[in-house]
Amino acid sequence: MNASATLTALRPDPAAGAATRLLAWDMIRTLIAFDTTSRESNLALIEWVQRYLESHGAECTLTFDDDKRKANLFATLRARDGNATEGGVVLSGHTDVVPVDGQPWDTNPFEATLIGDKVYGRGVTDMKSFSATGLAFVPEFVRRGLARPLHFALSYDEEIGCIGVHRLIDDIVKRGIRPLGCIVGEPTGMELVVAHKGKKGWRCRVRGHEAHSSLTPLGVNAVQIACEIVTYLTNVARAFRDHGTHDNAYDVPYTTVHTGIIRGGTALNIVPRDCQFDFEIRHLPFDDPDELIAEVKGYAQRFLPEMRKVAPDAYIEFDDLSTLPGFDTHGESDIAKLGEACNGTRDHRKVSFGTEASLFHNATIPAIICGPGHIAQAHQPNEWVAVDQLVRCEAFMRSLADRVCVA
Ligand SMILES: [Zn+2]
């Protein structure tokens, strides 16, 4: 069946609640029902999926975090000729979701709920629906027989800095598994994404000196110094926007810099001793984040002599918080061509948000990103995905089966 025929056959009738006609509907409901907020264990979900995959003949390997509270699952469906290692396609998704704490939800976030032409639930967009759709197609992949291996890579702790997937990737590299490429199902509106920006996060800690606020010259105001550095960052961000190199293939076509958290002071009548803030850069491949941090550190240095005249133990320090490289998969690579064929279009995009795709890419597993839903709905209260996006994801998966199956 071609993609457009599939779309017509499955196009939902909202009045009749036809999302239930989706092949993956039950699987989506099952995965959403596991509370896999990053701080929780994901083992219940992983073990459920492992049992499901093994019942269809997949070979599964788990790699754990240090406390054995969380695991990655890497599963392989062998090709009909027994090949389990060479030239396979990896379907990749993270199992964790961001917290719902303090968010005004109108439905139970851990119950996939169909209202009109949208499905609501934590993770329906970011990003359990893609994984669920791939899993729901396993019986079809098996029935038709695979010409090349098909792998599932389900990770933990993506939402807190792409932490878990490192162990999964190390493991498959060590075991000599050399896939053709990896499809990461983060929400792209089912458009093909071949590149994303890199990201680097830092914490700046300013230590000043406390004093009664009527005697400010006897203190060193950490909040005010921190704010001067934050303002410097704001100006750097403006310079990237106004004078930096742009790549219009990206949704935000220039490098961005942003301060996300600032904490300092204890009372209005005390000159604050401590202030810290977290900031990040999301950079195009040709902008170097290390250059930025060197510049910011240089700027911060200028405050130290005056601070130390009052308080010799004053300091300004920077801690690395996280690093996620960018990636750019060649549009002519096999995996990009496969993605195009499955999507029925040659259009590519580049995006500003980071994903595990760059980590696969750095391990010489070429990656693309393509998944249902839009990043704008991710991490929000009442996170939703349009049923039409799920229909497109199923069409993609069926088209993938046409290309990786024997029959
Ligand atoms: Zn995600």
Image (tube, rainbow, N blue to C red):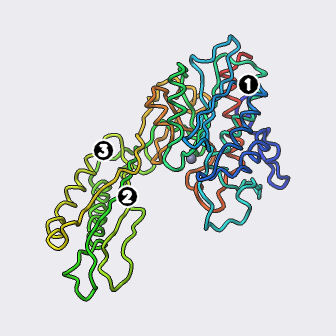
Name the residue at 27% across, 64% down: 229
Dot 1 crowding, Cα within 10 Å, few <14, some 14–19, many 20+? many
Name the residue at 74% across, 61% down: 108
Q: CA distance from mark 2 to mark 3?
A: 17 Å
Tell me the amino acid under the disc marked 3. Asp
Q: CA distance from mark 1 to mark 3?
A: 42 Å
Tell me the amino acid under the disc marked 2. Phe
Q: Nearer the viewer, residue 104 or 333?
A: 104
Tell me the amino acid under the disc marked 1. Phe
Which numbered circle lies on residue 141? 1
Name the element at disc 3.
loop
Image quadrant where residue 54 sits: top right
Name the element at disc 1.
helix
Residue matched to label 2: 279
- Please say if 87 is above or below 247: above
Residue matched to label 3: 287
Q: Residue furthest right?
A: 16
Dot 3 crowding, Cα within 10 Å, few <14, some 14–19, many 20+? some
Residue 36: x and y in percent read: 65, 50
Name the residue at 27% across, 57% down: 239
Image quadrant where residue 98 sits: bottom right
